[in-house]
Structure formats: structure tokens, C-alpha cells
Amino acid sequence: MSMSHLTENSAGASSRLLSAAKWRWYEIAFWIVAASLFFVFPTRLALLTEIVTLGLLALSIDLILGFAGIVTLGQGAFFGLGAYAAGIAAKYGMGVAPLSDPIVGLLIAGAVAGAVGFVTSFLVLRGSDLTRLMVTLGVGLIFAEVVNQARSITGGADGLQGVMLSPVLGIFDFDLYAQTAYVYSLGTLFVLFVIARVVMNSSFGLSLKAIKGNPLRSRAIGIPVNPRLIATYTLAAAYAGIAGGLLAQTTQAASPDMIAFHRSADTLLILVFGGAGHLYGGIIGAVAFRLMQDAFSSGSPDVWLAAVLNALPSFLNFWPIPNVLTVIFGLMGPKYWSLWLGLVLVLLVLFVRGGILGLVQSIYVRIFPSRNKVKP
Amino acid sequence: MFHKGFFKGILGAGVALTLATGLPAIAQETVKVGLILPMTGASASTGRQIEAAAKLFIAQNGNKVAGKTIELIVKDDQGTADMSKRLAQELVVNDKVSILGGFGLTPLALAVGPVATQAKVPAIIMAAGTSMIVDQSPFFVRTSFTLPQNTTPIAVWSAKNGIKKVVTLVSDFGPGLDAEKSFKAGFEANGGQVIEQLRAPLANPDFAAFLQKAKDLKPDAVFLFVPSGQGATLMKQVAERGLAQAGIKVIGTGDVTDDDLLNSMGDDLIGMITSHNYSTDHNSPENAAFVAAFNKANPNMRPNFMAAGGYDGMALIYKALEKTGGSTDGVKLVEAMKGLAWTSPRGPISIDPATRDIIQNVYIRKVEKKNGQLYNVEFDTIPNFKDPTHK
């Protein structure tokens, strides 16, 4: 290996590292499109709002899994803590600022979840992947039970009722069409995304990538591994808390299933589905997951079946074709959406590495091999 | 990082999907009814019973009423409150439904209340049973039951039939607390004594420890309430603890001896006494026709009290539309629903004009074996019984 080769390599590396921090046109387009959905789908804003909160939760998992390499099943705990913190604040604010102010509520949610994240991060640092998985799972279960038992504060299994918010910025009330809710949540997501992007492209973020790649070696070259992991875990917990706060505020309720295990598992799935380690993976995964779920679970299979059977040419109308169609359509609609969603997920995981983003990237590389020279 | 052209595909796919799912099918003469039900998850049986019953009602009565075509839209909220609320919002603003319905559990109904109020859309509670739900929105109307309504009769019956000391065991959420309170009130007003009140968690319950504690207290009877779907687990553990062998009677609301699951619970249940608003075995021509048609359309299901709530919910919607001459104005529909009375598969029912809650017969029943199958056989009736906790 010659000297010149080495310098060339390191120059290439540093320029690549720097260029990653630059905003690309498609990133700008992404956010413009997200904002324009407000006008394109004025009647689907409630769904879009939910996708935004889910995307924010997935982003928080991306910070610790995609960047720091900690596998977690406990992010739902911080999400739920944030939801209850924001919900309880708004409830005792009785709809009047400052306690019922949405933005104050989000700050409370983030602070509470972040504080708990900081304290529990010391547990998570102990042990290897499997131990961490169990610890995060255990922490989640503990808080779920606390919420269930503390009926006088949280409303127990019935959920927290009477969450009343003052208008956003003192002007915009939450409305039936979810217009305020969408703009408010998307704005929050954007601000937090920009912060995460800056942090992950800084030397701090790069050191996290090194830790993820090889913690022992990172420690040997002088990276303070544990403090970095604690900081990331705390940040991710605060993000999850804010996501929970957003959901509690936009649905004006908090319920035990917001802190339940399935939130953690679903969202981890969503991140893997979208592609971990890109910051955008969680958001895109949330969009794809919820839209597919909505598509698979809505619609009226009976009507479709009747239409298909009517349109079936007579030469195809023999056994077992109508019977097979009946079975297939019988599996559509609100009862069995998880079957189809599961099928898509299994196929994606089996045949595509890196989720949706990985799929798009590999297609792109195949179509334009020449533009991919800088790939390591 | 990823490359150019990266988002084109994703956005294209997203837009196509949203278009495919969000196509508005607005016809002036169509009245859309949106049912929000738990079709998956722990309460899935509730959703499936109600959906089957609502579809049966439409199949039997045609989809035309007062010159309008009824279109049923069923959405799965997975038993989570934030989803119920979001679906209610979407059904109103996107699908433009005129009437909402369903609501498998109390928290799910409560989440929808503000949407119904804000949008002025009637919301028919076909399952959830906490008494106070109807007070949370002037657009709530109930066709299911309330826990005080179903619990008070068994409390009174027990006190008058030689049971002196009772331990209550309920699920720790709204309806369970309603049942606990109503039982104590009804039982102690008639000379009984509740010696201990136990509450089991709603999610993933294990009743063993609670049942052992109840057994150790040596009461004359244990009163049980769990929501629809959990009865089988509970009764299996009741049999394992040997309450019957210890001479302790087991009583409860009919939620425990849910008709949908009763057959799988085993012969240990024979003789168990409950009070409830509906039994598959109810002896009336209306119910015989209902059960036969339900079984024909759904060969593997037995209609339970959830099905009755869904069936009567649709009946209420049809009757109200007839009364308004097809007008879908929410305020007019709710006004039309107040005071409506008819004979349902469960017997005579009516909507209390003051509370928008249901008035119905409550029956005292005993589990018996008939033609090799277990049934709740009714032997006493408390006619036109109103929720005693409503003012």
C-alpha cells in the first residue's frame, strides 16, 4: 500500500463524511411533499398525524439502534411516559396555558422521558445485546404496570380522560379535520429531525458509528464509549417521550396501550421495514406500514367478491376458481389485515436487506452503476 | 446516504396507495354507518360478533330504509383508544358517515365521545357497559347494557336466596368497578354482606391468586365479572381452585358465561347462576329466528350479548331513519331515537328519552345442558329494568 493511496483514501473519506451533512435536493423535496400533503389529502390528516407520531417514535429507535447499535424493546415505555406526562399536565391545566399549552406539554413529556431514559441507561449499558434486549423489555413492563396500578393519577385501564389543551401558540385550536394536529406534529417532527441530523453528522454521531462498528476498538482509540451511549439513549428517550406527548395531545387521551409492549415491537418492525441508520427509515417505514395497514383493513371484501364473481367470464367459472376467490376475498377486510401485512414484511426481510430504503438503493445502483463509484 | 431518484419511487407508491384507499364514493342517497370495532387483538370476539350481527340485520331487512341506501363500513381499532378516535375522525371527515357505532370497550367509547359531539354525529354504543359513558356526549345512544343494570338483579337474587357473605372479584377497569359497586349496593340493601372486594388486572389476567384468596375467606358465594372473551380462562381457574368442592357458590354477570365461549368451558359450570340481558337460549319467536339466521350465516359462532347489541343497534338506526324520513341530521336522529321501543331477540327494549340508555328485561339464568350443549337457561325476569345508578 503506497503512501499516496492512503492520503487519497483519507481525503476521499473526509470529503464523503462532510458531504453527508449537506442537504440533498431529495431531502428538501421530501419535506416539501410532507407539508403539501396538508392540501392534497385534506380529509386524511388524522391518519397522517398518527403516521407522523409513529415516524418520530421510529426515529428515536433509529438513534439508538441505527446509530448506536443498541437493540431495544423498551422505547414504548418512554413513549407512554411522555404520553401520560403531557396528558396529565394538560388535564390539570384544565385547558388553560401554561400547563395545557401544547408546546409546554411536549417539553414536559420530553423532560420526563429523558430523565427516566438517563437513569435507566446505566442498566442498559451492562451486558451484551441479548441482555440489553431483556433489560429494555423489563423497564417497559415495569412502567406499563405502574401506569395500570396508579389509577388515581393515570385512570388505570380505562385510560386518562379529560385531556384539555389550549390552542397551539395561543391561536390554533385542535379541530375535527386534524389540520392543526397535522401541521403541529409535522413541525415538531421537522425540528427534532433537523436536530437529530445535525447531531448524527457531527463528530459525536460519527463516533457513535465507530462504537457501533467495534466498541472495544473505539475505546482503544480514545472514544468515551459509555458517556456517548448514555447521551444517545437519553436523547432517544426524550424523542420517544415527545412522540408520545404528541399522540396524547392530538387524540386528547392517554391509555395503557400507549405504553404497552406492542408499541415497542411494532415500531422496531417499522424501523427495520423502512431501513435503519438513515434517519429517514423510520418515517418512511411508518408511512408504508400505516398505509398498508389502512389499505388491507379497509374496503368491503363482500362487495368486491360479488363484483369479481359477476365479471368472471363463464369459461373460467368452474371449480375451484370461484371457491378460491371466495377464500381469498374472505381473508380481506378488517379481520385479517395482519395476515397480509405479515406476508409483505416476511418477503421484504427475506429478499431485501436494509428495508425499503435498502430496496430503493439497490434498484438505483442497478440502474445507474456508473454514479455509484464512491460507494465504499 | 441514499441517492438521487430515491424518493420518487416511495412517494409515487405512497400517493398511489393513498388514492386507492381514500377514493370518495359519495352518493346523495347513501347513508353511511361506520362501525368502529376491535376486530383483532384481545377483544376480537366482540368485534366479530357485532359485525356478524349488523350484517345479518342488513341482509334480513334489506339495505334500503326511508328511500336511502345503507352502507356499512367496518374499521378495526385493535382495541386501542387512540386508533378509535382517529378512525372516528376519519369516518366523519373522509367517509362522511352519518352514524357511528360499535365501541368494544369503555375507553374506546370514551375516546370517540368528543368527535361525536364536535361533528354532531350519533354514536351508538353496541358493547361498552360502563354506566357513565352516555353522559359524556349528547350523541351517545346505547343498545348494549350497563353493568349496574346487569349486576343489581343477581345481587338482589343472591340476598334473597340464602347467600349471606360474598367475595367479589372483578376486572380492574370502569365496568368492573361499576359491577363491584352495584353488587355491594344491591346485596347489602337486602341484608347480605360483601366481606372482600378483589380486582384483577384487565390485561393478561391470572386469576389464580385472587381465587385462592376468595376461597380462604370462606364466603357463601363468589361474585365474578370479567369482560366478554375472558370468561373461559376465569372459569377454568375457578374449577382448578375447587371452589365448588369447598362449598362456595359461584355467581356473576352473564359476561362470564358468555354464550360464545360457554360450550368450551366444560360441565363444571352446570348450575352456575348469573344475571344478564341476553341469552342465546331466550325463549321467544324473535330470538329463535335470530339465532337460526345467525347460525346459518356464521356456522361456527353462537350469537352472544354482543351480537344482540349490534343487531339492535342496526335496528335502532333503521327505526330512527324511518322516523326522520331519511334525514341524517345528527340532532334529529338522536331525538328520533329517544323513546323508541320494539321487541328485540332479547325481549322488549326501549331507549330511555332522559338518559339515551337502554331499558330492557334482565334475566336470572342457570347454566344447563340441553341437547349436549351448555346454555344459560332463564328462570326469572326483572322486566323493563333501568340502570339504577342513572338519576
Image: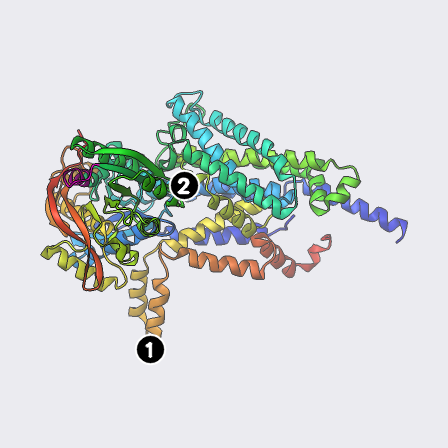
User: To which chain does the residue with label 1 belong?
Assistant: A
Please say whether residue A245 is visible from this viewpoint. Answer: no
Q: Residue at x 64, y 35 (%)?
A: A230
Q: Is residue A274 visible?
A: yes
Q: Is residue A274 left or right of residue A218?
A: left
State the residue at coordinates (59%, 43%).
A62
The picture places residue A103, in percent across and down from the top left corner, at 48, 27
Task: Tell me the kind of residue under disc 2.
Answer: Leu
Cβ–Cβ under 8 Å for marks 2 and 1: no
* Residue nearer the viewer, A167 or B57: B57
Residue found at x 70% / y 58%: A370
Measured as percent of width and height from the top left, residue A244 is found at 48, 36
> Secondary structure beneath disc 2?
helix
| Subunit ID for the residue under disc 2 | A
Residue A319 is marked as: 1
Q: Residue A123: which disc?
A: none
> In front: mark 2 or mark 1?
1
Q: Are dots 2 and 1 on a single chain? A: yes
User: Where's residue A175, x and y in %?
Assistant: 36, 33
Question: For mark 2, what is the residue?
Answer: A45
Disc 2 from disc 1: Cα separation: 45 Å
Q: Which of marks 1 and 2 precedes in the sequence?
A: 2
Above or below A261: residue B236: below
Q: Which residues are magenta?
A: B152-164
Eyeballing the image, is A206 above or below B229?
A: above
Tell me the amino acid under the disc marked 1.
Trp
Left or right of B20 in this view: B320:
left
| Residue B160 magenta-highlighted | yes
Count of numbered circles on the image:
2
Q: Could you say which is closer to the camera, residue B123 or residue A173?
A: B123
